[in-house]
Amino acid sequence: MANTPKKGKSRVVRYNKWGYIFLIPFIVVYLIFQLVPLFTTIYNSFFENYLSGLKQIGPNFVGLANYKEIVTNGDLIKYTQNTLIMWVLGFVPQIFFSLLLGAWFSDARLRIRAAGFFKTVIYLPNLIMAASFAMLFFTLFADSGPINTTMINMGLISEPYKFLEHAAGSRGLVAFMNFLMWFGNTTILLMAGMLGIDGSLFEAAQVDGATSTQVFFRITLPLLRPILLYVMITSLIGGLQMFDVPQVLTNGKGNPVRMSMTLIMYLNNHLYSKNFGMAGALSVFLFIITGILSLIVYKFSVQDNVDEVKPKRNRNKN
């Protein structure tokens, strides 16, 4: 009898070791391709290391000089603002239409025909490469493209509208393309969350005479908070890494007057010019900005949830 716990414990240890063995490939890949490059980037950010003509300058240790230059020249704030504006312009309609479509497709009372076909069509833009998507829109909205030609033939404008020479036009196109590419993926995620909600809650609400709008805002939306939080944070991280669409659409220049230049495009310019010290410092700033904004989104979501729970506890005590 005394040996039974030891046998049980040893059996658990032997079973658990396989979990650690299967984790080894992930840990090795993470260390080689994630953790080591991260620390290498931070290390390089303290050095002057760039190409001047055909001559390589550095690496020379300069401390925080690269960080100081990025902060003082004002480009970091401007490009962060550009990136966040284009992300918000694309994310707001994305989350609106995703919630709307998710509610429709997950509502058994509507009995939408060919729902599987429409779900596939909604998700298809997510499978198209962003560079190809950008080239398509570049052709469509060119000065002599189909959009301008159609508007001129309809009498809406008298001369071609130069979309990429106006801040609203270039930012709007980037936001619209990001919306088209990603709202299908967001719809699938939110739909999965809605289908995971206990159906008895909806049945009880129907018995109580709740309308579809009341059911959505009082039951569906509160229970979707974890999925919505995940979607917001991942979308924010992806938005801060926005690169391929504006890069192709504006030929890497961020026209007009760098109003559509993003943080990663700015970082790519330093990498293209072999200025590894500035690129490393900018990468660190991008890492910090991403962490701060993600933490703000998380804190606000958690605080709203706490504020809703407190009144319920107080009512239960009374």
Image (cartoon, helix red, strand yellow):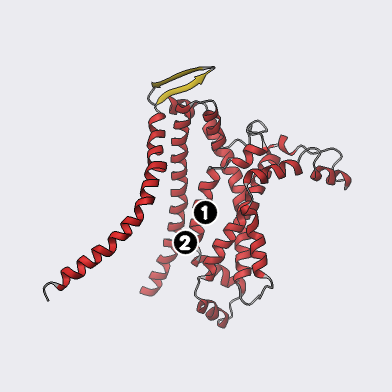
Q: Of 201 and 119, which appears nearest the observer?
A: 119
Horizontally, is 179 left or right of 290 in the view? right
Q: Residue 214, labelled with which disc?
A: none
- Label 2 Cα neighbours within 10 Å, binned few <14 / some 14-19 / many ≥20: few
Q: Nearer the viewer, residue 119 or 87?
A: 119
Which of the 4 image quarters holds residue 37?
top left
Q: Marks 1 and 2, how far apart in space?
A: 10 Å
Horizontal side of residue 103 vs 8, given as left or right: right
Q: Outermost residue toward the left? A: 2
Relative height, residue 51 to residue 179 (above, below)? above
Q: Which label number is shown at residue 226?
A: 2
Q: In front: 84, or 264?
A: 264
Question: At label 2, which amino acid type do we have?
Answer: Pro
Quarter occupied by the N terminus = bottom left
Instruction: Indicate the position of residue 262 as horizontal and vertical percent values.
Output: 57, 37
**Vertical comparison of 294 with 202: above or below:** above
User: Which dot marks residue 232?
Assistant: 1
Residue 249 percent across, percent down from the top left? 67, 38
Residue at coordinates 51% horizontally, 59% vertically from top-left? 228
Do tag 1 and tag 2 residues touch (Cβ < 8 Å)? Answer: no
Along the line of sight, the residue nearer the viewer: 267 or 126: 126
Question: Tag 2's secondary structure?
Answer: helix
Residue lying at 57% horizontally and 35% vertically, measured from the top left: 265
Vertical comparison of 230 with 116: above or below: above
Q: Residue at x 42, y 67 (%)?
A: 311
Left or right side of 264 for 122: right
Q: Dot 1: what SS?
A: helix
Q: Amino acid at mark 1?
A: Met
Q: Is residue 272 visible?
A: yes
